[in-house]
Image (cartoon, rainbow, N blue to C red):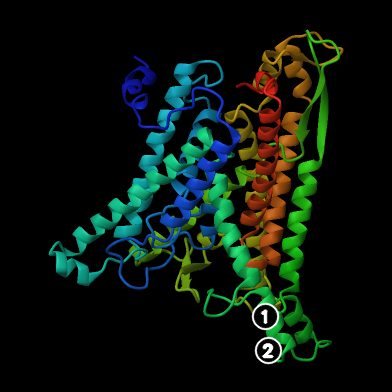
Amino acid sequence: MSWKETAEPVLTRMPGVERPEGHVPFRRKLAWTGGILVLYFFLTNVFIYGLASGGGNDAFGQFRTILAGGQGTVLQLGIGPIVTASIVLQLLGGADLLGLNTQENPRDQALYQGLQKLLVVVMCVLTGLPMVFAGGFLPASPQLAQQLGIGLTGVRWLMFGQILVGGLLILFMDEVISKWGVGSGIGLFIIAGVSQRLIGGFFGVPGVTANPGFFYNWYTIIVGEQQLGAVLSSQGILNLLIEPGQILFLFTTVAIFAVVVYAESVRVEIPLSHARVKGARGRFPVKLIYASVLPMILVRALQANIQFLGRILNSQWAGMPAWLGTYATSGGGTAEPVGGLFYFLAPIYSYQDWMWFLGTTSNPPSMIIGRVFVDLFIMVVGGGIFAIFWVETADMGPEATAQQIQNSGMQIPGFRQSPGVIEKVLERYIPQVTVIGGALVGLLAVMANMLGTIGAVSGTGLLLTVSITYKLYEEIAEEQMMEMHPMMREVFGD
């Protein structure tokens, strides 16, 4: 008996959101998307009952902008469990250990979806338990334990139950948007979190936001409340470029927007013609960023899990060897690696992590340069590898795409109408473009982190936001086109 027959009774009965039976009107999709977004913002402001004052340290640290959610709220886990489950499934699928044909077999599709949900639940447990019971990330309230008479252990289990429910809510909210809304829930939650920080970075005012924004800083500079020093001096130029001037941050933010939008427009267009309708022609675009920037979530989530493990070991293992990692408490109260293996595996977060000549870090230049090269290697190579996995998993590879073109009645002019022939043509472009695009996005993410961005948004978070917003715009335009021309649904699928 195969594992599929054994697990089928459980995996096919996993709770889920039903797919719509027919076409969902565009306005209803917008309503579902807007409603889920409002619910997301509401839940990020619902704090965990039983959490001690102060809320503890964020276990995800600088990865919070990518993994969404909110520190100390019921959405403490964010999209982390979903992304981690996707990494596990992609690795298993890439090694062909699952034996599932999700492209053609509906039974295997149902098993894959059920397995993904089961893994998300497992990841919620594996991530949530250490946050509550180890590391001091979510300290329990002694006063509440005394009032309820259940002890600190009882309060911790109560807190764990809340963040477990929050992790499951994120899963179902993502599923609702994927089936009834526009885009994906994961992308929407990332846009929401990064946009909040960007707005705060531009328009933040002390007393309202945690840090003053770009425009407020320049207002105080102009009225003389902040002194830049002699502008032509080395220190004055640094103050203009970094802080409080933040000109370099503004340049990086604008440059990332421009580069991603330009890269999204670079494509190889393969001509298509309809096999039965004379004169009906079209093009299949193979974009430079063919796999989108979503594989970057997988790379950064993998790094986030490694750093989370390091913080757990640092807090629970008093005799952890120095070669594995040494930690120091940052200004925000979070333990950050300053040496050892976990230091080299930690991504570059900002200019302060590598500009040793400014005195922002005490580590020797050789260690800093080594860390930069390791981060570049992980992002560039990992971006290419995960982009390939993403394309195959999302049925965007040459074989799946050729079958989709064949099913729509289209063919490549001058070639025989056959999925195998179309696949051979697509194999000339899709694999190469996928790897190049994934590596390019990884390089851009590291460079943006090194130079800094407005609102201290990570380079990966900014890349994701721009690319996801661009694709969301394209999806909205496509939905409007199908609303205006219902016959187009027969081409794209009702």
**Image point (84%, 10%), residue name:** 278
**Image point (68%, 89%), residue name:** 226
Residue in front for this viewpoint, 434 or 356? 434
Asked whether residue 374 appears in the rendered view, the answer is no
Q: Position of residue 470 (x, y in %)?
A: 70, 45
Q: Position of residue 301 (x, y in %)?
A: 52, 49
Q: Position of residue 372 (x, y in %)?
A: 66, 61
Residue in front for this viewpoint, 340 or 476? 476
Q: Quadrant of the C terminus?
A: top right
Q: CA distance from mark 1 to mark 2?
A: 8 Å
Residue that label 2 marks: 226
Q: Secondary structure at mark 1?
A: helix
Q: Are marks 1 and 2 in contact (CB under 8 Å)?
A: yes
Asked whether residue 227 appears in the rendered view, the answer is yes
Q: Position of residue 367 (x, y in %)?
A: 62, 67
Residue in front for this viewpoint, 365 or 191? 191
Q: How many residues crowd mark 1 within 10 Å: few (<14), some (14–19), many (20+)?
A: many
Dividing the picture into quadrants, the one containing residue 370 is: bottom right
Residue 178 lies left or right of residue 434; in this view the side is left
Q: Secondary structure at mark 2?
A: loop
